[in-house]
Image: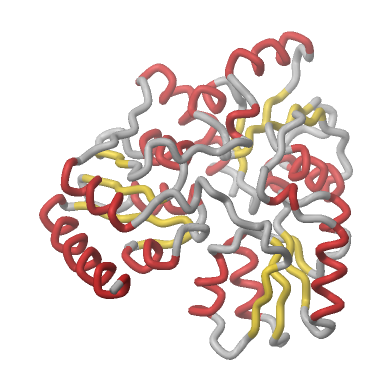
Amino acid sequence: MAEDKNHQLTEEIKQLKKERRAVILSHVYQRPEVQEVADYVGDSLGLSRQAAGTDAEVIVFCGVHFMAESAAILSPEKTVLLPEINAGCPMADMVTAGDLRAEKQALPGVTVVCYVNTSAEVKAESDIACTSANAVKVVDSLPPDQPVLFIPDRNLGRYVAQQTGRELHLWPGYCNTHDKLTREDILAAKEAHPQALVLAHPECRPEVIALADAVASTTGMLRYARESAAGEFIVGTEAGILHQFHKQCPGKSFYLASNKLICPNMKATTLEKVHRALATLQPRVTVPAEIREKALRSLERMLAIV
């Protein structure tokens, strides 16, 4: 019965998409049926750039709020819809523009590197953005004597500091999902699957990263698994990515490192909500022009070096 309903919704979504001249983007952490109805599946910034390059008039972003904001920053002329308007990111909420301004006053002359997992207002207060895939390259691009404040993920910041050899000022934020993964979880998974390689997201704790065979963004993990001669992998990131692993790497086995790796915000979007968003062109995400212009600069500075 559920499959029949999903099939009907999928067909209706396809029709509405044509009528609205829309493009549907899905993060790899979304539900499998949502990923399947999307035109593009990937990481947050890559999806926004993809949408900016299309002639679509409407962007339906199946993700969380900061992702839809990024799409609105890069495509101000398009209508950006977030099917579940309350799908937020706890880590992004751990830093506000006001808090950041106060910290900048306390650290005069500091360069602020913001993870894309931040609000548009925070990006507007930052000097340059980064993704989990290019954070090391972004920090390496800065003058070695330049003090750097890395926000908001302390785990990603620690990883970048280790890789670059730089001392960074770290904001005390973290991903509620990745930070739940422990060293004990990895050791238990390795005992259960001794031949499997461990893939870890850099938002994981340092003790988890220390046990990984590869540390990479979601896109990087997928590439690594496709290109690796190994046939088994322990996956240290959100469960939704398993759908893409199975699609892109048939014949290989993937084991979630812990059943705690489920983000409720990423799972809040359903086919029904995607359908409703296309039918009503709501909920819409917009970014005020003055904030958008400043936030765009931090993204463009990043894009200029990667």
Q: Is residue 21 above or below residue 239?
A: above
Image x and y of residue 5, in percent: 25, 68
Q: Nearer the viewer, residue 304 or 33?
A: 33
In which image quadrant can residue 189 be found? bottom right
Most extreme residue toward the left, as rendered? 19
Please give left or right for residue 133 compared with residue 284 in the image. right
User: Total number of numbered labels?
Assistant: 0
Residue found farthest to the front: 1
With respect to residue 102, does 220 lie above or below? below
Q: Quadrant of residue 229?
A: bottom right
Pick whichever, 150 or 205, lies toward us: 205
Q: Which x, y percent locates residue 299?
A: 52, 36
Q: Nearer the viewer, residue 56 or 264?
A: 264
Q: Quadrant of the N terminus?
A: bottom left
Determine whether 249 is above or below 219 in the image: below
The reply, left or right, for residue 41 in relation to residue 59 is right
* Residue drawn at 67 percent across, 63 percent down: 259
Residue at 51% over, 72% down: 244
Q: Position of residue 87 (x, y in %)?
A: 45, 40
Up-down: is 274 above or below 74? Answer: below
